[in-house]
């Protein structure tokens, strides 16, 4: 027998205290996030950004569950993306090696581009908006990649070692991509698609091109 009656009671007491502490910490995170989220969404103010960043980077599954009680999954991703965009805006502007990552689903269904080692190799046929985005981004010192999947991102990070990453994607993928980069300390910006899905998606071109030009 490892524990007698008294030892067992003490063990349960310690476990009870640990559980109560964990619940208190969880509640504190929830309350802090609700307050910070309220100011971000309703008052357009980013309060205690470092605290919000730590919570968003490390406790996003709890925040997502909380958000599902009052809204949709996309509501949470929208708040998260908005937060990362605001938090990293100035850091991203100062980044020297910027990379723009575009989703291949923006391509036209008859896209003649081939898939190469660095993703889809656009031939600027003007059938979709990607060609114009690439030209503006290159003029503004971005390296641009049209990627068919998330494994490409990891390789680009490893090989190109960017100091700033701008991504375009659907809400869910964009949030998790920004979260992944943020946890690695890489300044990030992101723009969600207007219409998502696997093919012929769309993006707000005016907003995207303005943001690319503005991030110099
Ligand atoms: S502009 Fe580029 S990405 Fe778009 S359809 Fe033409 S080749 Fe494909």
Image (tube, rainbow, N blue to C red):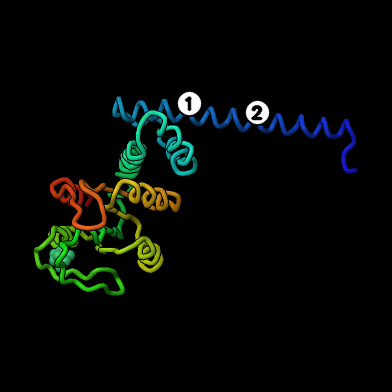
Q: From mark 1 to mark 2, how far is it between C-alphas?
A: 16 Å
What residue do we see at 33% from left, 55% from top?
A: 164
Residue 21 falls left or right of residue 189: right
Q: Is the C-beta separation of discs 1 and 2 under 8 Å? A: no
Q: Nearer the viewer, residue 144 or 172?
A: 172
Q: Position of residue 62 (x, y in %)?
A: 48, 37
Q: What is the residue that sits farthest to the left in this orientation?
A: 126
Q: Residues within 10 Å of mark 2 (few under 14, many from 20)?
A: few
What residue do we see at 44% from left, 32% from top?
A: 66
Residue 23 falls left or right of residue 201: right
Q: Position of residue 159 (x, y in %)?
A: 38, 69
Q: Is label 1 in a helix, a strand or a loop?
A: helix
Query: As displayed, is residue 204 above or below residue 38?
Result: below
Q: Can you tell me which quadrant of the image ligand 1 is in?
A: bottom left
Q: Residues within 10 Å of mark 1 (few under 14, many from 20)?
A: few
Query: As displayed, is residue 101 above or below residue 9?
Result: below
Q: Which residue is mark 2?
A: 20
Question: Residue 7's image quarter?
Answer: top right
Query: As displayed, is residue 150 above or below residue 56?
Result: below
What residue do we see at 21% from left, 71% from top?
A: 121
Of the two numbered discs 1 and 2 on the same chain, state the one appearing first in sequence.
2
Q: Is label 2 in a helix, a strand or a loop?
A: helix
Q: Position of residue 89 (x, y in %)?
A: 30, 44
What residue do we see at 27% from left, 74% from top?
A: 116
Question: Residue 139's image quarter?
Answer: bottom left
Q: Which residue is mark 1?
A: 31
**Can residue 164 be seen by looking at this rendering?**
yes
Q: Quadrant location of the N terminus?
A: top right
Q: Nearer the viewer, residue 55 or 26?
A: 26
**Can residue 87 be seen by looking at this rendering?**
no
């Amino acid at each position: 027998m490892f524990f007698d009656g008294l030892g067992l009671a003490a063990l349960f007491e310690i476990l009870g205290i640990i559980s109560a502490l964990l619940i208190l910490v969880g509640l504190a995170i929830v309350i802090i996030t609700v307050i910070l989220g309220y100011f971000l969404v309703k008052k357009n103010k980013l309060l205690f950004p470092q605290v919000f960043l730590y919570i968003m980077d490390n406790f996003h599954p709890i925040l997502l569950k909380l958000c599902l009680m009052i809204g949709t999954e996309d509501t949470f991703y929208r708040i998260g993306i908005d937060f990362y965009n605001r938090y990293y805006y100035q850091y991203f502007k100062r980044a020297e090696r910027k990379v723009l990552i575009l989703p291949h689903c923006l391509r036209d269904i008859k896209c003649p581009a081939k898939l190469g080692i660095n993703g889809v190799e656009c031939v600027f046929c003007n059938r979709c908006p990607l060609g114009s985005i690439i030209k503006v981004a290159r003029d503004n010192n971005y390296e641009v990649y049209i990627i068919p999947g998330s494994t490409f991102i990891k390789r680009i990070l490893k090989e190109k070692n960017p100091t700033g990453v701008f991504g375009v994607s659907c809400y869910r993928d964009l949030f998790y991509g920004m979260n992944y980069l943020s946890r690695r300390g890489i300044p990030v910006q992101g723009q969600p698609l207007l219409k998502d899905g696997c093919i012929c998606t769309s993006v707000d071109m005016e907003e995207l091109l303005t943001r690319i030009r503005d991030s110099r």
